[in-house]
Image (spheres, grey):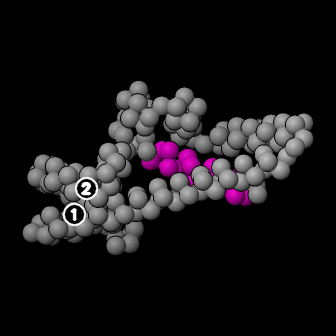
Amino acid sequence: MSDSSRHDAPKLDEAQFSVWHGQFAGDLRAFLCGVLKDPEAVDEALQRTWVKLWEAGTTVEPGKIRGWLFQVAYREALQLRRSRQLQTRKLAEWATLKRIQQQSTNDPVAQELIDHEEQVALKAALETLPEEQRQVVRQRLGDDRTFQQIADEQSLPLGTVLTRMRLAMAKLQKIFKRSE
C-alpha cells in the first residue's frame, strides 16, 4: 500500500480499533515473543503493527483482521530483526576499525589528537539531533541506562524511546558517512 493511499484510507473507528486491540493484543504479543525473544523488540513490533492498522483504516476487511494483524506483525518482526542485525554488524565493523587504528598508531600524541578530533566530531554531530533524540542517545550511551529506564524516566512509551534512538543512530550514521 503506498503512502498516499494510506492517508486517503477512510479512518478506522476508535471503538472498533479498541475492540480489535482487546481481542488480539495478547495473542499477538505471545506470537511475537516466540519470533523475537526480546521484550523490547516485541513492544516495538506490536506498536508498529497497531500503527499499520490505524493507517490502513477501514481498508482491512473485518472478517480477515486476525490474519492481517498476524501477517503485519510477522513482517514487522522480521524487519526489526534485520535492522538490529545490521546495526550490530555495523557496530562490530566500527569497533574493528577502531582497534586497527589504535594498533597502527604507536605515537601516543598522534593517538591523542585522533581521539580528540573524534570527540569533537561526535559532539558536533550530537548537536544536530533534535533535543528528544539527543536526550535518548545521551542517557542510553552516556549514562548506560536501558531503554525501559529511559521510557520510565521520561514517561514515554518504550516504542517511542526506541524510535527516537533508531532515528538518531540513522542520522548520525549519515553524518559520519559523509565525513569519511
Mark 2, secondary structure of its residue: helix
Q: Residue 104: horizontal and vertical position, in percent?
A: 83, 50
Name the residue that disc number 2 marks. 34
Mark 1, secondary structure of its residue: helix
Q: Three-letter amino acid code at disc 1?
A: Phe
Residue 131 falls in image quadrant? top right
Comparing 46 with 7, the one in front is: 46
11 lies above or below 60: above
Q: Residue 70 carries which label?
A: 1
Q: Three-letter amino acid code at disc 2?
A: Gly
Residue 66 falls in image quadrant? bottom left
Give the residues in magenta: 163-178
Q: Residue at x 16, y 49 (%)?
A: 26
- Per the picture, the main secondary structure of the magenta-coloured stretch is helix
How many tags in the picture? 2
C-alpha separation, residue under disc 2 versus residue under disc 1: 13 Å
Q: Residue at x 48, y 58 (%)?
A: 85
